[in-house]
Amino acid sequence: MPIIKIDDKDYDTESLSEEAIAQLTSIQFVDQELARLQAQVAVLQTARIAYAKALNDALGSELVFN
């Protein structure tokens, strides 16, 4: 019987309604997707910085892209 805390109140997941379980499952899915997308954004930002540096090196000028 896992316990979850919502707004500083503990709930036994076995006592939740089907609707509450469905909403909780949706929230967990969305949280996982947000974490995945935030990690993807970090990777893409890192790649962009590397591409901008490579462009800067190729142009032999100051980096103009941030």
Image (cartoon, helix red, strand yellow):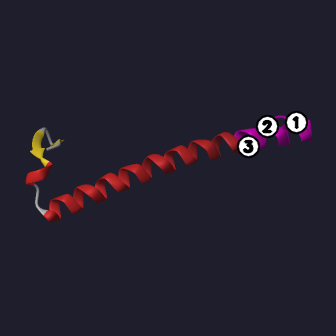
On the image, numbered disc 1 is attached to which residue? 57
- Callout 1: SS: helix
Report the span colored magenta.
Answer: 49-66
Q: Are marks 1 and 2 in contact (CB under 8 Å)?
A: yes
- Left or right: residue 23 compared with residue 51: left
| Residue 6 visible in the shown view | no
Q: Classify 10 Å Cα crowding around label 1: few (below 14), some (14-19), many (20 and above).
A: few
Q: Amino acid at mark 3?
A: Phe
On the image, numbered disc 2 is attached to which residue? 53
Mark 1 vs mark 3, CA separation in Å: 12 Å
- Front position in the image: 11 or 60: 11
| Residue 48 visible in the shown view | yes
Q: Amino acid at mark 1?
A: Asp
x%, y% of residue 35?
A: 44, 46
On the image, numbered disc 3 is attached to which residue? 65
- Front position in the image: 26 or 49: 26
